Image (cartoon, rainbow, N blue to C red):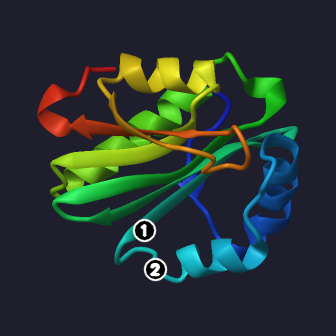
Amino acid sequence: MINGGGPQRMRWWDLDEVLELETVLFDEPWTREQFLGELAHVPQSRHYLVVRDGEGLRGYAGLRAVPPEADVQTLAVAPRTQGTGLGRALLDELLAEARRRGCTEVFLEVRHDNEPARALYIARGFEQIAQRPDYYGTDRHAAVMRLRMSDEVAP
């Protein structure tokens, strides 16, 4: 359960707030067009969520699911709510959706030096299977991680 308000399906009208948070959190933020492209595939192969409270957007997450595989496309938590368990709750929501859709493996990429995110993924049963050098720019490598749903750690 997500405290402060449950997840809602991301809609096009959420994008102003999503893009604002995107620029705060990421060196190379997604564009409006990228998000619109993703949302165009909801619900067929995508699942995107936002979480709000009285102060606005707390976080968002997105999944691409084409069984038997799924990919965590994005997961972001506003600085004011980091460390509250929201990232874990959003990831759990994405994993539950992947399971509902019949996916047996979930993949993601995360910056190799993003220790809080990597720790979250490892705690949920993800393992690093590869590294993509300079994926996020010079000396900013991506850790490619995979979760076999049979290895998932219960929330």
Q: Which mark is residue 46?
A: 1
Q: Secondary structure at mark 2?
A: loop
Q: Position of residue 52 (x, y in %)?
A: 72, 44
Answer with left or right where residue 154 lies relative to residue 50. Answer: left
The three-letter amino acid code for the residue at tag 1 is Arg
* Residue lying at the far left of the rendered structure: 150
Of the image marks 1 and 2, the number of the one nearer the N terminus: 2
Q: Which mark is residue 41?
A: 2
Determine which quarter of the picture holds residue 147.
top left
Residue 34 higher or lower than 140, as above or below: below
User: How many C-alpha atoms fall within 10 Å of the one at disc 2: few (<14), some, or many (≥20)?
Assistant: few
Between marks 1 and 2, how big is the CA–CA gap? Answer: 6 Å
Q: Secondary structure at mark 1?
A: strand
Q: Which mark is residue 86?
A: none
Determine which quarter of the picture holds residue 87.
top right
Q: Residue at x 56, y 46 (%)?
A: 7
Residue 85 visible, this angle: no
Q: Position of residue 98 (x, y in %)?
A: 28, 52
Answer with left or right where residue 127 lies relative to residue 118. Answer: left
Q: Position of residue 19 (x, y in %)?
A: 81, 60
Answer with left or right where residue 76 lies relative to residue 99. Answer: right
Residue 68 visible, this angle: yes
User: How many C-alpha atoms fall within 10 Å of the one at disc 1: few (<14), some, or many (≥20)?
Assistant: many
Label 1 close to label 2 by CB (< 8 Å): yes
Check the picture and name the quadrant holding the C terminus. Answer: top left
Q: Nearer the viewer, residue 15 or 6?
A: 15
Residue 107 higher or lower than 12, as above or below: above
Q: Residue at x 85, y 65 (%)?
A: 16
Q: Position of residue 23 (x, y in %)?
A: 86, 52
